[in-house]
Image: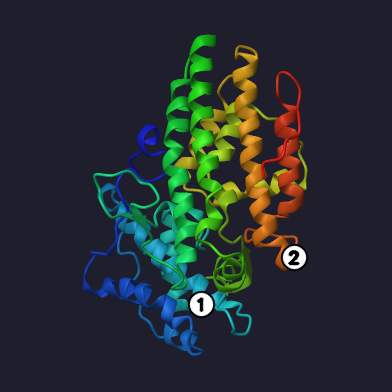
């Protein structure tokens, strides 16, 4: 898969495919995908979806020119599977029928990822531009696939898409530090990262503009929940569990954590966070390992510039924490996020240790 981190960040180099053009028999995925928000309102949706014939991915690999098609194929199937298992208003379901399970497992294996809709399918591949001459930004983008008809879900996804687009400047700066670099080059890169993080925080703060906390919690959050003890019929006999879609599967903050060498303590929470990497695209995981191997910037970096990046990382997590309280914690006693994240303890823990890594010592601030 072609990479262009410096210009597109973790978004695909090409705008995502919006229609499957692998042949007439594959058009069923686009058709069912478009119907899905209406279909999931019906009590017999699972009966209908069990009868849909989904053709397997017809290649033994993913040819370079078919990556956008493979990502859309996985996206459509991932949404359909999560809609099937997590359908709101219906009994708990622990079995994915073979007509959905087999093709989902096959394409997921080729993409080197677990067979469930994750952040990549929900956000990274799930957007289109109204005007291709304008940036990938709110106001110029829409989603390709949704679980519900509410614009609130689109807004939730699209905020993450713009954040990923803005992160291209972070990746450009990180790439510039590969190899032998001196203090001046490090400080320049840190300034660029800080500027991008400032913009990213401003976008994240826009979540409430067009997303109701009640609608988020009750109408579409359940669809991105975990698969608990699910049998993939025709594939595995034993039930298996997978983490649900979550922003913790974005590669941006893990990348910065590796770059800044933040020494998070090894415990259940950090092991959980590291496990999220299994749900990232394979090339993202590879980049994180490459950045992990880079030298520590802290000894050569200007204290103010190094600490500014850490403070902005902490501020980003504080905004995330604030929205987690507003959109989830106030409405339930469940301490876990959609990815199984114990998010209240987890975010506080990450914030504190990020600030503690500053060259001039940590300081707690609250972002309203």
From this view, report whether residue 86 is shown above or below residue 270. below
Label 1 vs label 2, nearer the camera: 2
- Pointers 1 and 2 in contact (C-beta within 8 Å): no
State which quarter of the image contains the N terminus: top left
Q: Is residue 51 left or right of residue 314?
A: left
Using the image, tell me which numbered label, if any, was put on residue 187: none
- The residue identified by callout 2 is 334
Q: Which residue is pictured at 75% across the width and 65% down the height?
A: 334
Tell me the residue that label 1 is attached to: 84
Residue that appears at 63% across and 65% down = 241
Counting labels gives 2
Q: Using the image, determine if residue 8 lies above or below residue 242.
A: above
Residue 255 picture location, percent across and down? 55, 35
Q: How is the image coloured?
A: rainbow
Among the 4 quarters of the image, the one containing residue 261: top right
Q: Is residue 76 left or right of residue 192?
A: left
> In the image, is residue 199 above or below residue 21?
above
Asked if 64 appears above or below 176 in the picture, the reply is below
Residue at (60% x, 31% y) in the render: 258
Q: Residues within 10 Å of mark 2 (few under 14, many from 20)?
A: few
Q: Secondary structure at mark 1?
A: helix
Q: Secondary structure at mark 2?
A: loop
Q: Nearer the viewer, residue 44 or 327?
A: 327
Quadrant containing the C terminus is top right
The mark nearer the N terminus, 1 or 2, is 1
- Return the x and y of residue 112 as percentages of the image width and height: 47, 52
């Amino acid at each position: 898969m072609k990479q262009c981190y410096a210009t597109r960040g973790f978004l695909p180099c090409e705008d995502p495919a919006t229609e499957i053009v692998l042949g007439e028999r594959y058009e069923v995925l686009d058709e069912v995908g478009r119907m899905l928000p209406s279909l999931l309102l019906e009590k017999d949706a699972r009966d209908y979806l069990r009868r849909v014939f989904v053709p397997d991915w017809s290649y033994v690999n993913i040819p370079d020119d078919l990556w956008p098609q493979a990502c859309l194929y996985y996206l459509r199937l991932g949404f359909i599977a999560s809609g099937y298992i997590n359908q709101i208003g219906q009994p708990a379901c622990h079995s994915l029928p073979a007509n959905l399970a087999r093709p989902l497992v096959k394409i997921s294996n080729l993409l080197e990822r677990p067979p469930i809709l994750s952040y990549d399918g929900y956000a990274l591949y799930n957007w289109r531009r109204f005007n291709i001459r304008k940036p990938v930004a709110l106001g110029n983008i829409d989603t390709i696939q949704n679980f519900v008809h509410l614009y609130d879900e689109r807004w939730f996804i699209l905020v993450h898409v713009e954040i990923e687009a803005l992160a291209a400047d972070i990746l450009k700066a990180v790439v510039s530090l590969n190899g032998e670099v001196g203090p001046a080059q490090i400080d320049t890169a840190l300034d660029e990262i800080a500027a991008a993080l400032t913009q990213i925080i401003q976008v994240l703060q826009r979540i409430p503009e067009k997303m109701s906390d009640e609608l988020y919690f009750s109408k579409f959050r359940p669809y991105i929940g975990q698969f608990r003890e699910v049998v993939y019929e025709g594939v595995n006999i034993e039930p298996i569990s997978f983490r649900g879609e979550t922003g913790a599967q974005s590669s941006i903050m893990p990348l910065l954590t590796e770059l800044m060498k933040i020494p998070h303590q090894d415990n259940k929470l950090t092991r959980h966070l590291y496990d999220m990497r299994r749900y990232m695209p394979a090339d993202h995981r590879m980049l994180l390992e490459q950045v992990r191997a880079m030298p520590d910037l802290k000894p050569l970096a200007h204290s103010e510039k190094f600490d500014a990046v850490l403070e902005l990382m902490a501020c980003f997590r504080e905004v995330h924490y604030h929205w987690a309280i507003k959109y989830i914690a106030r409405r339930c006693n469940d301490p876990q996020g959609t990815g199984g994240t114990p998010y209240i303890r987890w975010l506080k823990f990450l914030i504190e240790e990020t600030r503690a890594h500053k060259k001039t010592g940590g300081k707690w601030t609250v972002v309203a």
